[in-house]
Image (cartoon, grey):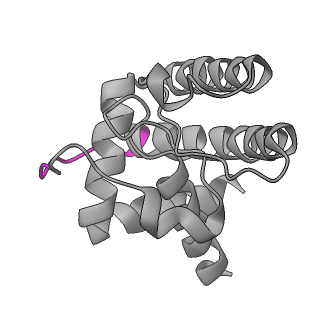
Amino acid sequence: MFSCFHYILKITLLTTTLLFFESGLNLVSPTQYDHKIRVAAIAQETSYDQQQVKNYAEALLAIEPLRQRTFREIQTILDSEQVPTIACNRSQSYRNLTSEARSLITNYCDRSKEIVQQKGLTVAEFNAITTEVKSNPELKEQVQAEMLELQ
């Protein structure tokens, strides 16, 4: 069971990476993760309290189904075309898509930001934790444990 949640955390972190930094919130298929994700910030050693870790885990779990649904809807709209890497803070990353796809992306990005804020984090805090989880095994374990508890 733990390895299942480790996989979910890995996928969730990759897909919700850095909501509004340069690399944005990527809407990529599972086979594209390793190729599409680029971290724009340098991880800093920071400690987070248990409430921040819980809030972060809750945000991840709330955003991921929305990301998956939005990705599937965009795939349907684009039909056989590959879904490009999309960054919420870079409208040029989706400017050439249809208006319907752009609308889905805008709604997704707005909703993701709301979720992060509703979970008691700023976007900057969410992004900082995302960056740190990737390089801090202890924090990653804390997030995994919290996700297990929330499931």
Q: Position of residue 123 (x, y in %)?
A: 39, 25
Q: Residue at x 66, y 52 (%)?
A: 150
Rendered view: 55 above or below 134: above
Task: Say if residue 38 shows up in the picture.
Answer: yes
Specify the quadrant of the image occupied by residue 90.
top left
Q: Position of residue 15 (x, y in %)?
A: 54, 51
What is the chief secondary structure element of the magenta stretch? loop
Is residue 39 left or right of 59 when viewed as pictured? Answer: left
Specify the quadrant of the image occupied by residue 125.
top left
**Which quadrant, please, contains the C terminus?**
bottom right
- Indicate yes or no whether the magenta region holds residue 94: no
Q: Residue at x 63, y 66 (%)?
A: 30
Specify the quadrant of the image occupied by residue 128.
top left
Rendered view: 30 above or below 37: below
**Which quadrant, please, contains the N terminus?**
bottom right
Magenta span covers which residues? 44-51
Q: Residue at x 64, y 38 (%)?
A: 63
Q: Position of residue 116 (x, y in %)?
A: 52, 27
Task: Say if residue 49 shows up in the picture.
Answer: no
Q: How many marks?
A: 0
Q: Position of residue 52 (x, y in %)?
A: 39, 38
Please name whichever residue, 3 or 65, is drawn nearer the observer in this view of the structure.
65
Is residue 108 left or right of 44 when viewed as pictured? Answer: right
Q: Residue at x 73, y 38 (%)?
A: 66
Is residue 94 left or right of 44 when viewed as pictured? Answer: right
Rendered view: 49 above or below 99: below
